[in-house]
């Protein structure tokens, strides 16, 4: 299967400049991010992708929406591939609001309030990545899946650190990599 990190969001833009949480909840893509997603769609056009699995955050759903204009594949939303809950951007949007915005997506058994509390532990993230690896290993056609997800989740699943719209291959049959500790993260709430 292929893993793609979402395109640039407003959080990425502001955090990249100041290295502080700008307090943006579930941010949308920037103009540059929308262009990145279009480029990603072009790069994936020749790949044998048969379905999209997407995290329930706006930035991943928006990336998938742009990619899917070209690929025209079924999209299923999967909470397991969400970002490590740490910053304000990792506070999600209710299922009801997401269904109104993306009525054609399969939200499966996603709960109304589906995101995790902030400051999720590395152990929790590792457990989620392992649960997803197991789910894909036991499913059919994982080889044709494109998973649009996040930096922290890709790192937990593969050990790799990737940029916006970077794509990496992942075989769920492989064993879980040894991922070095992320070390201390910047607190979710910054005081002046």
Image (cartoon, grey):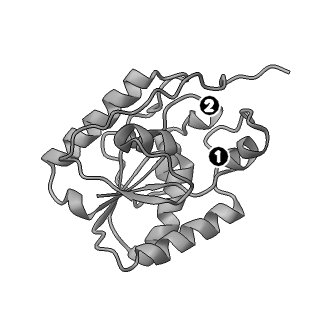
Using residue 96 as the reference point, say whether residue 52 is left or right of it.
Answer: left
Q: Eyeballing the image, is 45 above or below 31?
A: below
- Of the 4 image quadrants, the one containing the N terminus is bottom left
- Of the 4 image quadrants, the one containing the C terminus is top right
State how far apart marks 2 and 1 are (Cα).
Answer: 11 Å
Q: Tell me if mark 1 has few (under 14), some (14-19) or many (20+) residues whose alpha carbon lies within 10 angstroms of its own.
A: many
Using residue 68 as the reference point, say whether residue 143 is left or right of it.
Answer: left
Closer to the N terminus: mark 2 or mark 1?
Answer: 1
Q: Position of residue 111 (x, y in %)?
A: 39, 34
Name the outermost residue toward the right.
Answer: 192
Using residue 59 as the reference point, say whether residue 14 is left or right of it.
Answer: right
In the rendered image, which residue does mark 1 sit on?
27
Residue located at (40% from left, 29% from top)? 125
Residue located at (62% from left, 37% from top)? 89
Q: Which mark is residue 87?
A: 2
| Res 69 seen here | no
- Residue 71 occupies quadrant: bottom left
Residue located at (33% from left, 36% from top)? 129
Residue located at (55% from left, 72% from top)? 38
Q: Eyeballing the image, is 29 above or below 88?
A: below
| Res 162 seen here | yes
Badge 1 element: loop
Q: Which mark is residue 148?
A: none
Q: Toward the viewer: 146 or 172?
A: 172
Badge 2 element: loop
Q: Position of residue 124 (x, y in %)?
A: 38, 24
Q: Eyeballing the image, is 102 above or below 190?
A: below
| Number of marks present in the image shown | 2
Q: Eyeballing the image, is 33 above or below 154?
A: below
Residue depth check, mark 2 versus mark 1: number of the one nearer the observer: 2
Q: Tell me if mark 2 has few (under 14), some (14-19) or many (20+) residues whose alpha carbon lies within 10 angstroms of its own.
A: many
């Amino acid at each position: 299967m292929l893993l793609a990190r979402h395109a640039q969001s407003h959080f990425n833009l502001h955090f990249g400049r100041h290295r502080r949480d700008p307090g943006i909840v579930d941010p949308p893509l920037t103009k540059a991010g929308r262009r990145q997603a279009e480029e990603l769609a072009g790069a994936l056009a020749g790949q044998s992708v048969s379905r999209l699995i997407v995290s329930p955050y706006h930035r991943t759903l928006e990336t998938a929406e742009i990619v899917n204009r070209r690929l025209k594949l079924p999209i299923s939303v999967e909470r397991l591939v969400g970002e490590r809950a740490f910053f304000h951007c990792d506070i999600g949007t209710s299922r009801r609001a997401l269904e109104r915005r993306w009525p054609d997506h399969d939200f499966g058994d996603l709960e109304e309030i589906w995101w995790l509390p902030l400051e999720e532990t590395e152990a929790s993230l590792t457990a989620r990545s392992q649960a997803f690896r197991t789910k894909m290993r036991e499913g059919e056609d994982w080889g044709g899946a494109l998973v649009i997800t996040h930096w922290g989740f890709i790192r937990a699943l593969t050990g790799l650190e990737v940029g916006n719209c970077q794509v990496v291959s992942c075989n769920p049959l492989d064993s879980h990599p040894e991922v070095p500790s992320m070390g201390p993260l910047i607190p979710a709430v910054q005081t002046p």
